[in-house]
Image (tube, rainbow, N blue to C red):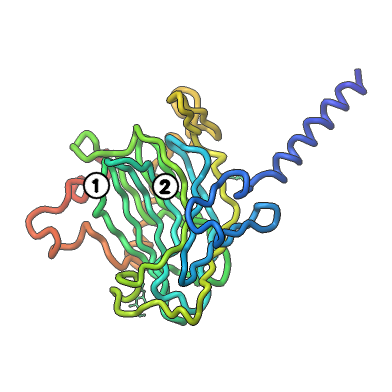
Amino acid sequence: MRGASGLRWLAAALLVAVGAANDHNFHRDFDAVWGKGNARFRDDGRLAELALDEQTGARLQSKDRYLFGRFDLEIKLVRGESAGTITSFYICSGGARHDEVDFEFLGNVSGEPYLLHTNIFSDGKGEREQQFVLWFDPTAGFHTYSILWNPHNIILYIDGTPIRVFRNNEAYGVPFPTRQPVHVFASIWNAEEWATQGGRVKTDWSRAPFVATYRRYNVSNACVWDAGGASRCSGGGGGRGGGGGWMSQMMDWWSWMTLNWVRMNYMAYDYCADRKRFPHRFPTECIIPIGTT
Ligand SMILES: *[C@@H]1O[C@H](CO)[C@@H](O)[C@H](O)[C@H]1NC(C)=O
Ligand SMILES: *[C@@H]1O[C@H](CO)[C@@H](O)[C@H](O)[C@H]1NC(C)=O
C-alpha cells in the first residue's frame, strides 16, 4: 500500500515537474505565420526572437484560439536605434467585423523613449487609441504585458499595473467582444511612415536587424475554444458564478488609483480627450461615468 501510494506520489511529482519544464513553449504553442526565417526559438522554445530587416519582419500566431482569457507575455524591446519599428503583442479574431486588443511599441531614435500605442476594436470598429510613455526602460530587461479579457471588461496591464480599461457597455450600445474567438499574436514590422515622431524619422537600415525578445507566454487563465464552439476554461474561468477568478475580475479601488496614477503621469494621448477629432460629441464609452457599469 505504502509502495503504491509512494509511486503515485512520485508520478504526480514527475508530472508537475514535466509540466513546469514544458511551460512557456513558443515552439509548441505558436506558428510563425509571416517572416518565418526571422522568427527564432531558443532555449527549448522558452525564448522567441523576432527580427526585422530590410526584407521582412516576423509574426507569431498562437495555435490555439481563445474566447476570454488573461494573456501574459514578457517582452524585451529592440535596444538602441529602433526608429520606424513596431513591436507588438495583440489578440485578434480576424474576419470582417473583427475584435482586437493591441499593445504596439513604437520605436525611436537611439536614446529617445518608446511610445506605447494601444487600441481596441470591437465589431470591426477601432479608433480608440491611447498612448503612453513608460516609467522604465523597456529595452533594458523583460517586462510583463497582459491583456485581461472577460465578459465584464478588457484591462491592459504592465507588470501588474492597470494602464487601460474598456468596460462592457453593450447596454449603452457600444459593441463589446464576447462572441469571436481570438488568436494571440506577437510581431515586429516596419511602420516608418507613421511610427516615429509622426513619420518624420525613418528606419535606419544600417542598424538592422532589429530584434525583440519574448518569453514566458502564459495562458494558464484562459478558455481554449475548439472548432465545435465549446470552450475549456482554466485558472478560475470555468464553473458557474465566477467566484473571484479572472473571469469575473474587474477594477477595484486600488486598481482605479493606480490607473489614475498612470494616466496622470504617463499618458501621451487619449482619444476620449481629443476635441479636434470629436468636436461635437465624444464616443459613447468616453462619457459613461465610472461606476455605472
Ligand atoms: C520619440 O522621441 C521624441 C522626443 O523625445 C518623442 O516626442 C516621441 O514621442 C518619441 N516616440 C515616438 C514613437 O516618436
Ligand atoms: C501564469 O500566471 C498565473 C497568474 O495569472 C500564475 O499564477 C502562474 O503561476 C503563471 N504560470 C507560469 C508558468 O508562470
- In the picture of the structure, the residue carrying the numbered disc 1 is 125
Give the class, few, some or many, for how many residues have Cα within 10 Å of label 2's Cα (few <14, many ≥20): many
Secondary element at image label 1:
loop
The residue drawn where x is 78% and y is 31% is 12
Q: Is residue 12 left or right of residue 88?
A: right
Which of 221 and 225 lies nearest the eye of the viewer? 225
Q: Which residue is at the front of the view, 44 or 2?
A: 44
Q: Going 47% across and 55% down the picture, which residue do you hit?
A: 34
Q: Residue at x 35, y 41 (%)?
A: 153
Q: Residues within 10 Å of mark 1 (few under 14, many from 20)?
A: few
| Ligand 1 position by quadrant | bottom left
Q: Is residue 264 above or below residue 254?
A: below
Quarter occupied by the C terminus: top left
Position of residue 189 in the picture relative to residue 73 (left or right): left
Residue 91: mark: 2
The x and y percentages for residue 185 are 46, 50
Q: Is residue 256 left or right of residue 28?
A: left
Residue 86 in the image, given as x and y percentages of width and height: 41, 65
Q: Amino acid at mark 2?
A: Ile
Q: Amino acid at mark 1?
A: Lys
Question: In the depicted view, which residue is nearer to us: 124 or 20?
Answer: 124
Does 203 sit above or below residue 124? below
Q: Nearest the camera: 142 or 83? A: 83
